[in-house]
Amino acid sequence: METIAVYWESRIKTYGFRDTLDLSFLELGFQSGRLPEWGLVIHEMGDAGISFELVVIQYGGEKDLRVYLLFKRKWEEKVINHIFRAIWKDEGETFHITSPVELIFFFGPHFGDRYGIADSAFRALTHKDITIIASGFSGSAVYLILPEGTAQDATALLNETFEIP
Amino acid sequence: MERIRIEGIKLSGELAAINFRNLPGEKDFISRFCQILAENQVNLLFLSTTSLRKNNQISCCVAATDLDIVKKLIASEPVMASHTEFILPVGSLSIFPHQFSLKILGLILNIFGRINIPLYGLTSSLSALTCITDYAHLHTAVKAIRENIDVPSDQISLKPEIQVKQSQDYKNKLLLRKTNSS
């Protein structure tokens, strides 16, 4: 059976924007072979009561796996302590924290199945020189990580591009 | 380690992964890439970008059927083309709900690492953790996850049940029909 859905919108509809301020963005780089150990370290962070706002992993080959974790800034010290106990700096493992950062989250109908959603989001912000530190588009969800003090302006710009019915 | 329970696992069909590594930061390659795909009606089924310390990385997936056109589009952008890596066939494995839990995330990473299957990308959404790996390894990953995490057996979708594709052709036909009838 074929189901045809047509989205015919002069402005793309979304269910609204949610911003979260005062966050920290961790970048952790290691070789793929260390994934089991780093998995346990991240699990231990969960045992310590830390949760994530967003996670992104990017693959740069066997020798370069990057894990990016976005979490509440109040947990930054705890996270750093966990990383320090586990990191093999002599083996080239790296970590970097960008803080504070802000997050905009929004989602819409079948965003994951439609072309042009990422283009519209990037176009809205980069044309006004708002830096996007990182982004994640998966399923119907869009996450944009922005520098401190820019989420409000960014939301206003996204409101011009996307429509909240 | 305590036994964790999740509600389900969903697998995709065959996809092509495209990674751009170390794109120079002085030009907005991320926007450009999204633009050329949108202009050619190619959907990004999965996308993550990072721009840190003047270094841009893009990790994304398109339907395997879109690969040829994507290759042509990237080839027309020489700087981008020189930083591109194609991996295929890949597939996505979505685990839900993640509950924003680092315990679930850590366990999933530990499992992927222990069974030694590649993790080409991962992004969280509102409820799911979507992992990208070799298409041929999806069922191995599901088996390993089920050995370590409780998943109701009727909540494992091993094949996509429906495929949704936005079609400009159909939209144009509707527009034509509407124009003729008015």
Image (spheres, coloured by chain):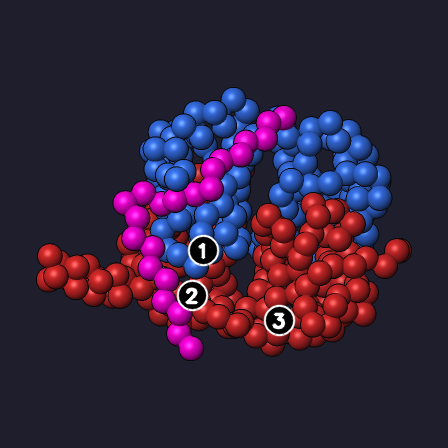
Chain colours: A blue, B red
What is the three-letter code of the residue carrying label 3? Ser
Residue A55 locus on image (x, y percent) = 63, 46
Q: Chain of mark 2?
A: B
Discs 1, 2 touching: Cβ within 8 Å = yes
Q: Which residue is mark 2?
A: B164
Q: Residue at x 62, y 61 (%)?
A: B94
Characterize the local packing of mark 1: few (<14), some (14-19) or many (20 or more) Cα atoms within 10 angstroms: some
Q: Chain of mark 3?
A: B
Q: Is residue A116 visible?
A: yes
Left or right: B99 with respect to B20? right
Residue located farthest toward the right when viewing the structure as drawn:
B1
Is residue B151 positioned above or below A125 on the image? below
Is residue B137 positioned above or below A97 on the image? below
What is the three-letter code of the residue carrying label 2? Val
Quarter where residue A159 is shown: top left
Q: Tell me the element at label 2.
A: loop
Characterize the local packing of mark 2: few (<14), some (14-19) or many (20 or more) Cα atoms within 10 angstroms: some
Residue A141 locus on image (x, y percent) = 52, 48
Residue nearer the viewer, B114 or B124: B124
Q: Is residue A82 visible?
A: no
Left or right: A37 with respect to A61? right
Residue nearer the viewer, A159 or B75: A159
Left or right: B167 with respect to B129? left
Quarter where residue A89 is shown: top right
Residue A19 inside the magenta-drawn segment: yes
Characterize the local packing of mark 3: few (<14), some (14-19) or many (20 or more) Cα atoms within 10 angstroms: some
Left or right: B35 with respect to A81? left
Q: CA distance from mark 3 to mark 2?
A: 16 Å
Q: Which residue is mark 3?
A: B157
Q: Residue at x 81, y 52 (%)?
A: A40
Q: Earlier in the sequence, mark 3 or mark 2?
A: 3
